[in-house]
Image (spheres, rainbow, N blue to C red):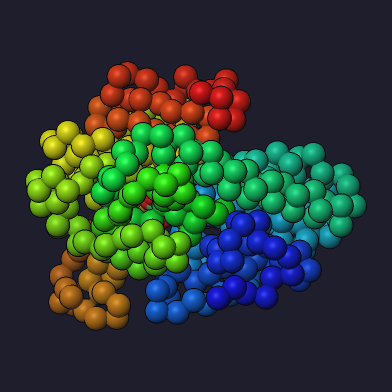
Amino acid sequence: MSTDLSRAPLSGADWFAVEFDPATREVVMLDQRRLPAEVRYHRYRKPDEVVDAIRDMVVRGAPAIGIAAAYALAMVARDETGDGQMFLVANGTAGRILNATRPTAVNLGWAIARMSRRAGKVYELAPELRYQGMLEEAEAIHREDVASCRRMGEIGAADVPDGAVILTHCNAGALATGGYGTALGVIRSAHAQGKNVRVLADETRPYLQGARLTAWELHQDGIPVEVITDSMAGHFFQTGEIGFVVVGSDRIAANSDVANKIGTYSLAVLANQHEVPFTVAAPWSSVDLRTRSGADIPIEERSRDEVARIGGTTVVADGIPCRHPAFDITPARLVDAIYTERGVVRPKIGERPDVLQGEPFGSR
Ligand code: MRU
């Protein structure tokens, strides 16, 4: 299943969303549009191809698209052999184009800003050294994301009851991150600790990340998973089967409001109605203290076609409009816990992410 990468993947697994091949200086990505029917990797030589791959959701999930963008900027440095000013202009232009691809996930802008800071430090070096510096930064972003996922996974797993049936939505797994996953990192970690957990994966219309990706990825790891349609969640709360909910996030505002895949808010309402813990796992790079509340988070609108067609089959007649907000906002008052690599925030008791601002990795 693995591809012919010239080194061990930084993800730490034999399948991955995004890697860089230093021998060929190309980005390698698993085409998530084709999963689970086909496991196919593509190699991308040009930064513009990575822009298209993010927009077309070859790669998706907030941390993974940030990492892909960082590698694209390393490729910009690889190609720009002019003077330092030309390099800075090329980096800035590519950063703006990359940042416009998916507006809700703040990890994208976060990674681009971090790469720009590195560009500001290396721009006077010789082109090859500039490239090496930019690649080093992108790889650091990738490695740190995997470490963050593992740490938040351990932190979150402590809250998971033994024997719990866990509901998750969309895909916040290894496929959505540098490796290991955020929400699925919590589940993986609970499973690794010997807790007897079972997962209900919401199919996640319209893009079916739950059915196509989450179920595939948990199955690879031998973690018990069943797929339910989005409309079944209420029933399984009512029967008392669901004991814990964990999801990922694309952006967490300063007041602990959480943006995540469309449908997350409905699950939070259900979880609260049924007194089931509703929790979020996300790296610190998803926390946006400059965004005051969920109302200030831009919601990406995607195409009508993704709603009107499923797997190439038309399910809404031509000419009938569809709505397609790709994300929604879950208010802080519905969120029991936010797990990050820096520690836990408990919004329901009034905690805000800034309590973790000065905390080093995993200290709280
Ligand atoms: O549209 P997608 O598939 O990129 O949406 C992904 C999600 O909503 C994830 O839950 C989120 O990005 C967190 S991924 C660790």
The relative height of residue 137 versus residue 28 in the rendered view (above or below) is: above
Residue 298, given in percent of the width and then of the height, sits at: 37, 43
Q: Residue at x 18, y 75 (%)?
A: 315
Q: Nearer the viewer, residue 347 or 75?
A: 347
Q: Nearer the viewer, residue 1 or 105?
A: 1
Task: Give residue 161's quadrant in the image.
Answer: top left
Visible residue check, residue 205? no
Residue 69 placement (x, y as % from top left): 59, 55
All told, the count of numbered labels is 0
Q: Position of residue 329 (x, y in %)?
A: 29, 40
Quick check: 184 left or right of 264?
right
Left or right position of 277 against 92:
left
- Name the residue at 31% across, 65% down: 211
The structure residue drawn at horizontal position 56% and vertical position 53%, both measured from the top left corner, is 178
Which residue is drawn at the image coordinates 21% and 61% (left, top)? 228
Q: Quadrant of residue 304?
A: bottom left
**In the rendered view, does 193 fall on the left or right side of 357?**
left
Q: Is residue 129 visible?
A: yes
Residue 194 sits above or below residue 216 on the image: above
Residue 356: x and y, percent? 50, 23
Rendered-image quadrant of the N terminus:
bottom right
Q: Nearer the viewer, residue 33 or 5?
A: 5
